[in-house]
Amino acid sequence: MKAAYSIFILVVSLAVFGIIDVCNAQKLSNNFYKRTCPRVDQIVKEIIQNRIRRNPDLGAKLIRMQFHDCFVRGCDASVLLDTVNNTRAEKEAIPNQSLSGFDVIDEIKTAIERACPRVVSCADIIALAARDAVSAHFKKSLWDVQLGRRDGRVSLATEISGNLPGPFANISSLIQLFNRKGLDVNDLVVLSGAHTIGVSRCGAFSRRLYNFTGKGDADSSLDRTYAETLRKQCPNPASPTITVEMDPGSSLSFENHYYDILLQNKGLFVSDAALLTDRNSNRAVIRLQRSPSSFSLHLQNP
Ligand code: HEM
Ligand SMILES: *[C@@H]1O[C@H](CO)[C@@H](O)[C@H](O)[C@H]1NC(C)=O
Ligand SMILES: *[C@@H]1O[C@H](CO)[C@@H](O)[C@H](O)[C@H]1NC(C)=O
Ligand SMILES: *[C@@H]1O[C@H](CO)[C@@H](O)[C@H](O)[C@H]1NC(C)=O
Ligand SMILES: CC(=O)N[C@H]1CO[C@H](CO)[C@@H](O)[C@@H]1O
């Protein structure tokens, strides 16, 4: 139950802190568009519901997009901008090559512009769409989204590094990068719980399977049986087009199962496994794992 609430509160804090601290100190509110675009919530919800039927994995795509947006220049939709004048945009950077869902945001933006032109920011649309897509398999919204983010005009591929952690990040650099956004160790552990949904390409972790220290070995912090399974799924280190579920068998359900996996040494990335290597983050993992009722059960029977 605690896990449910923490995930709930902290996913929101990602959205909120991103703008208050990093962006333009604009105050967010629950009724930001009450007069100027009262149907904004409804428009987003309808389009997401339509899309989810064809793409049940849309929640994973959009919450990851929000994470990438918020960690570079605050939650300002800079992740959506295209390259102009040969200055490569965030989209072009390697971590973004596996982002998707841009067409969904475009569809929503088009519908909203028709209803209330030039009022609603793309950053708010990303936040609402991510919430609604993750919540789609539940009977109600999993968290509140406050609105009022303003869009930026700058997007630089060079700003990914130093802001977004990579899958081989150790615990000290994870803590440092999150700290820079006003997020603490507990926030790091809770937000990493988003890896309970979605997939990863082999390339983001296969070094752990084949040649971790340069001696043709596997990462000893990874469960050996699980490593064997992963080698079968990713038969060569690059396997660029193959993806695997990050929370096997449960990658469409948003609950605290990620922490079970972590404690069995089956976290997929070095950055997942790293959460066990620090006293405070380890404690947070155990606390979240012990939560008796799963996220979804709790929310369906409040
Ligand atoms: C703590 C640092 C984090 C690292 C190092 C990290 C890294 C990654 C990587 C490497 C992938 C796979 C991408 C690929 O296939 O190439 C991934 C996927 C994903 N990440 Fe993270 N991530 C982090 C935190 C987060 C956070 C805070 C969220 C959201 C709140 C998030 C949500 C997701 C989701 C949902 C996916 C699956 C996307 C899909 O199915 O397409 N991650 N992450
Ligand atoms: C791109 O370059 C053109 C021509 O040099 C210039 O007029 C325009 O302002 C530039 N656009 C941006 C976004 O920098
Ligand atoms: C963690 O990673 C950072 C950045 O790659 C590196 O500078 C640092 O030495 C690493 N820390 C440990 C304890 O391995
Ligand atoms: C493993 O890594 C080492 C050091 O980087 C390299 O010399 C070696 O060729 C690699 N082995 C394989 C099988 O790729
Ligand atoms: C979604 C997206 O824009 N992906 C881009 C990521 O970067 C590569 C390489 O620069 C582009 O080809 C992709 O289009």
Image (cartoon, rainbow, N blue to C red):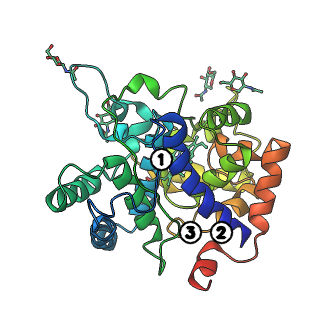
Task: Evaluate whether residue 7 shows in this view.
Answer: yes
User: Which amino acid type is marked by label 1?
Assistant: Lys
Q: Quadrant of ligand 2?
A: top left
- Numbered badge on residue 250: 3
Where residue 137 sits, quadrant-wise, is bottom left
Question: Is 106 in front, or is 226?
Answer: 106
Left or right, 181 with reference to 105: right
Residue positioned 58% across, 63% down in the render: 248
Residue at image position (37%, 52%) is: 124
The image position of residue 14, as x and y in percent, is: 55, 49
> Front-most of 234 and 284?
284
Q: Looking at the picture, which amino acid does disc 3 mark?
A: Ser
Residue 212 % position (x, y) = 67, 33
Q: Say which mark, if any, is on residue 27.
A: 1
Residue 4 disc label: 2
Residue at disc 3, CB closer than 8 Å to ligand 1? no
The alpha-carbon separation of the residues under discs 3 and 1 comes to 37 Å
Mark 2 and mark 3 in contact? Answer it, CB < 8 Å.
no
Is 81 placed above or below 222 here?
above
Circle 2: residue type:
Ala
Mark 2 to mark 3 CA distance (whole Å): 17 Å
Quadrant housing the N terminus: bottom right
Answer with mark 1 or mark 2, whichever residue precedes in sequence.
Answer: 2
Q: Mark 1: is the Cβ under 8 angstroms from ligand 1?
A: no
